[in-house]
Image (cartoon, helix red, strand yellow):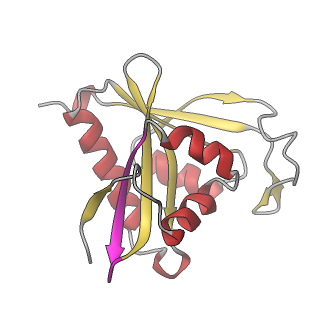
């Protein structure tokens, strides 16, 4: 399996990377807004991105996982865990105090993964997805609320 590499997002984004980003966040304008100051890391196979994670500064001393996606053919192989662990290590090395992630109330697999990786639910932002032009359904549940999770990086510092 290929290693994780930093993506230079100031250059043109490949169609494959754009598609991965859109898998996690279908609003391209929203994605473009946070790519401006983001750190993007990806796993490539044969020159093609198969998984990515996007980190952006959050609050005073934190960093947020803004986007995380694994191509369908490669899901279930631990790549999301690998990218999250890499994000935690990178954020710790860069001196951030906390790492945050927000996901929909209907994203049951993602909620389980983040909690298994040490994130704790901080709060729920109600009705964040209520006015989306197309309602989002996952696992037979309408996505309306945003669940905010956080992990302190203090324990990771050596």
115 left or right of 96 in image: right
Q: Is residue 72 above or below residue 145?
A: below
Whole-percent x and y of residue 51? 43, 66
Residue found at the far top of this picture? 60
User: Where, quadrant-wise, is the C terminus in this rendering?
Assistant: top left
Which of the 4 image quadrants contains residue 124? top right
Residue found 78% across the figure and 48% down from its top: 143
Q: Is residue 44 above or below residue 127?
A: below
**Magenta stretch contains residue 51:** no
Whole-percent x and y of residue 92? 24, 34
Residue found at the far left of this picture? 158
User: Main SS type for the magenta part?
Assistant: strand
Q: Is residue 63 above or below residue 19?
A: above
Whole-percent x and y of residue 95? 23, 26
Residue found 51% across the figure and 61% down from its top: 69
**Magenta stretch contains residue 39:** yes
Q: Is residue 143 above or below residue 156?
A: below
123 left or right of 153 in image: right
Which of the 4 image quadrants contains residue 105? top right
User: Where, quadrant-wise, is the N terminus in this rendering?
Assistant: bottom left
Disc tally is: 0
Front-most of residues 125 and 27:
27
Whole-percent x and y of residue 128? 77, 35
Residue found 62% across the figure and 63% down from its top: 23
28 left or right of 6 in image: right
Residue found 78% across the figure and 30% down from its top: 126
Front-most of residues 32 and 141:
32
Magenta part of the chain: 38-47
């Amino acid at each position: 399996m290929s290693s994780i590499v930093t993506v230079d997002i100031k250059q043109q984004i490949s169609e494959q990377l754009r598609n991965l980003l859109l898998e996690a966040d279908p609003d391209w304008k929203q994605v473009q807004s946070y790519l401006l100051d983001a750190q993007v890391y990806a796993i490539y196979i044969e020159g093609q991105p198969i998984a990515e994670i996007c980190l952006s500064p959050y609050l005073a001393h934190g960093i947020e996982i803004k986007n995380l996606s694994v191509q369908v053919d490669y899901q279930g192989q631990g790549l999301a865990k690998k990218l999250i662990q890499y994000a935690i290590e990178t954020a710790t090395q860069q001196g951030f105090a906390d790492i945050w992630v927000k996901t929909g109330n209907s994203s049951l697999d993602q909620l389980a993964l983040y909690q298994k990786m040490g994130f704790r639910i901080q709060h729920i932002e109600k009705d964040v997805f209520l006015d989306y032009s197309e309602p989002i359904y996952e696992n037979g549940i309408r996505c309306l609320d945003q669940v905010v999770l956080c992990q302190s990086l203090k324990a990771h510092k050596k």
